[in-house]
Amino acid sequence: DVKVTQSSRYLVKRTGEKVFLECVQDMDHENMFWYRQDPGLGLRLIYFSYDVKMKEKGDIPEGYSVSREKKERFSLILESASTNQTSMYLCASSLKTFKKLNTEAFFGQGTRLTVV
Amino acid sequence: SQQGEEDPQALSIQEGENATMNCSYKTSINNLQWYRQNSGRGLVHLILIRSNEREKHSGRLRVTLDTSKKSSSLLITASRAADTASYFCVEPRGAQKLVFGQGTRLTINP
């Protein structure tokens, strides 16, 4: 069974802390994504990576960075957590697209982060 | 950036009825995808329809696509309590990105 695993289901962090959210996939996918999901705003793309050490900004990258040192692992980093980063964070992976034929994305169960 | 929009935002029907959700998107697409999110299984892919297809079926799901109107619809027939979830249409942007709408919250009442 294919799997995207996020390291934590729930996290509580203090304002100003550096926070690491980890995601691992076992499908040998090239693409990996980080989204945040907020009521009324849907899913918004923070960053994505299409290869090891490659990354691109999504729609809301401010306050975040990412790391992809190995193909199977994609980390989201909150450099200095703030209360407005309290959210549900979802990681996803997909095969690289060829000839503009996008493939389905597989999602992790999500990490609910609360910044106090 | 802008993203597709689902309509209605919320839908409540009786078990056994059909549910129809609509989606409008912004760009010229090669395909459109629909996903479902519930508390039990998280966010999962339901169906992908390519731009040269007008209709696609998967079990009780039927998806239509009208590229001239930049719209799609998802029909769930003979709804069940387990269909209670949020449904998202997903518009590819560029080669690799997937952009989600805000979703339709579907509630199936017993």
Image: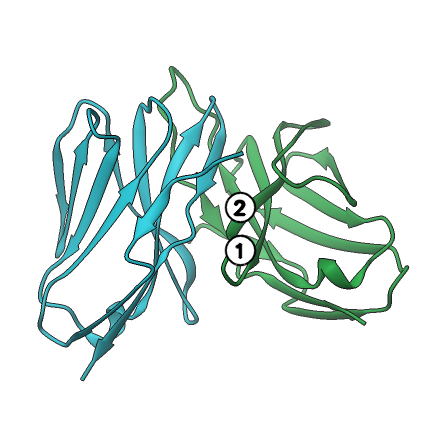
Chain colours: A green, B cyan
What residue is disc 1 on? A108
Residue occupying image coordinates x 21% and y 30%: B69
Secondary structure, mark 1, is: loop
Which residue is outermost to the bottom? B110
What residue is disc 2 on? A92
- The disc placed on residue A9 is none
Whole-percent x, y for residue A62 in the image: 75, 41
The quadrant of the rendering that contains the C terminus of chain A is: bottom right
Q: Which image quarter: residue B80?
A: bottom left
Q: Could you say which is closer to the camera, residue A108 or residue B49? A: B49
Q: Mark 1 lies on which chain?
A: A
Q: In this view, does A57 lie above or below B100?
A: above
Q: Which image quarter: residue B5?
A: top left
Instruction: Answer with left or right where residue A43 lies relative to residue B12.
Output: right
Mark 2 and mark 1 in contact (Cβ < 8 Å)?
Answer: yes
- The amino acid at mark 2 is Ala
Q: Mark 1 to mark 2: distance in Å?
A: 6 Å
Q: Could you say which is closer to the camera, residue B78 or residue A32? A: B78
Which residue is outermost to the top? A99
Whole-percent x, y for residue B105 in the image: 34, 64
Secondary structure, mark 2, is: strand
Mark 2 Cα within 10 Å, few/some/many (few <14, many 20+)?
many
Q: In this view, does A98 lie above or below A46?
A: above
Whole-percent x, y for residue B60 in the image: 12, 57
Residue occupying image coordinates x 83% and y 57%: A81
Q: Which image quarter: residue A68?
A: top right
- The amino acid at mark 1 is Gly
Residue occupying image coordinates x 64% and y 50%: A23
